Image (cartoon, helix red, strand yellow):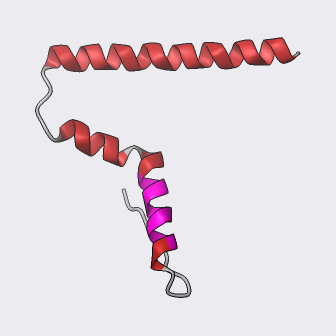
Amino acid sequence: MTLEVKVRNNNVEKAIRQLKKKVMKDGLLKELKRRQFYEKPSLKKQRLMKESIKRVNKLRRQQERLNNSN
């Protein structure tokens, strides 16, 4: 995986902001923080279940909004 940001007109601050956005969008920072320490398999399973429940609830809310607007 390669993230690339071009610096235009010597505007380094803007390039850094773009890089931060790309890193956040890819979830790279979240992944690095998660891998910083060992995660027991049972805790990993709990985390994955919690994330999946969050994802399902988010999709359900979005569908409800679409149904209410129609």
Residue 4, by quadrant, is bottom left
Residue at horizontal 50 percent and vertical 20 percent from the top: 55
The answer to whether residue 5 is seen in the rendering is no
Q: Main secondary structure of the magenta part?
A: helix
Which residue reaches farthest right?
70
Q: Position of residue 31 (x, y in %)?
A: 29, 41
The answer to whether residue 15 is seen in the rendering is yes
Q: Position of residue 34 (x, y in %)?
A: 23, 36
Magenta segment: 14-23
Residue 63, by quadrant, is top right
Quarter occupied by the C terminus: top right
Using the image, determine if residue 13 lies above or below residue 9: above
Q: Is residue 20 shown in magenta?
A: yes
Q: Position of residue 50 (x, y in %)?
A: 37, 15
Residue at horizontal 48 percent and vertical 55 percent from the top: 21
Q: Position of residue 37 (x, y in %)?
A: 12, 36
Q: Is residue 53 shown in magenta?
A: no
Q: Is residue 65 left or right of residue 41?
A: right
Observer-nearest residue: 17 or 36? 17
Residue 19, by quadrant, is bottom left
Which residue reaches farthest bottom?
9
Q: Is residue 49 left or right of residue 8?
A: left
Residue at horizontal 49 percent and vertical 87 percent from the top: 10
